[in-house]
Image (cartoon, rainbow, N blue to C red):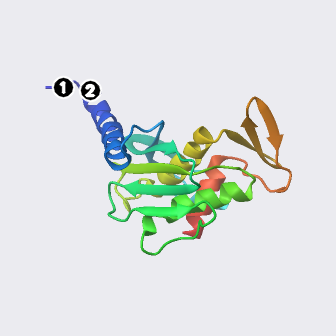
Amino acid sequence: MPSPSTSRRAPLRDAVGATRTLFKRTFGHAPTHLIKAPARLELLGSHAEWNDGLALTVAIDRHLCLAAAPRTDGRIELVSSAYPQRERFWLSDLAANPEAPWTALVKAVLRELRIRGVHFGGFSAVVHSEIPPGAGLGSSGALLAATALLIRQLYPHKLTETGATVRRLGREKRSEEHTSELQSLRHLVCRLLLEK
């Protein structure tokens, strides 16, 4: 019989392996980046964070994994283990697609990052989740956070009070066009959830 600590790690290992396998089967090569975002339980303050209140949450041992690799053709291609609809679109077209509604949250993060001056290119990505949707465990928040972190890894930047600072070739270039800034990833996630 496996020890409790081994049992707790097994789902994550399976999610990571399943995500990498799906990416390789779909795109014919291994992903260059892998993001894991945990599910969460709300202990106190349910939905209070949406209204700038406080909430007490705890991460649990179920995860959403997002595997990706950059592309040079100006397109984004998204695949999910949970939905049959594959979504391909140009960087210039981040509008929601009713035929692939699961991609709306990913596109919402991309739109918000673009508004804040983050420059990013195309990528191929696979989503695999152990977090059941609609169960109150933060599946949408995990997808939002994983998407934002993925873009940060693929196209390094940091958000500042005046927009984005993009790191390229050891130099920093500041985008001053947008005066509004995310004070934390939590605010981005909360705002996108409210628009859902």
Image quadrant for the C terminus?
bottom right
Residue occupied by mark 1: 2
Q: Farthest residue in the left direction? A: 1
Q: Disc 2 vs disc 1: Cβ atoms closer than 8 Å?
A: yes
Residue at image point 41% right, 51% down:
127
Residue occupied by mark 2: 6
Query: Which amino acid lies under the numbered mark 2 shown in the image of this protein?
Result: Thr
Query: Which amino acid lies under the numbered mark 1 shown in the image of this protein?
Result: Pro
Q: Is residue 41 visible?
A: yes
Locate residue 43 relative to residue 115 in the image: left or right.
left
Image quadrant for the N terminus?
top left
Residue 74 placement (x, y as % from top left):
59, 55
Q: Secondary structure at mark 1?
A: loop
Q: Is residue 104 above or below residue 79?
A: below
Q: Quadrant of residue 8?
A: top left
Q: Nearer the viewer, residue 173 or 146?
A: 173
The crowding category of the residue bearing disc 1, from other C-alpha atoms within 10 Å (few below 14, some 14 to 19, many at least 20), is few
Q: Quadrant of residue 3?
A: top left
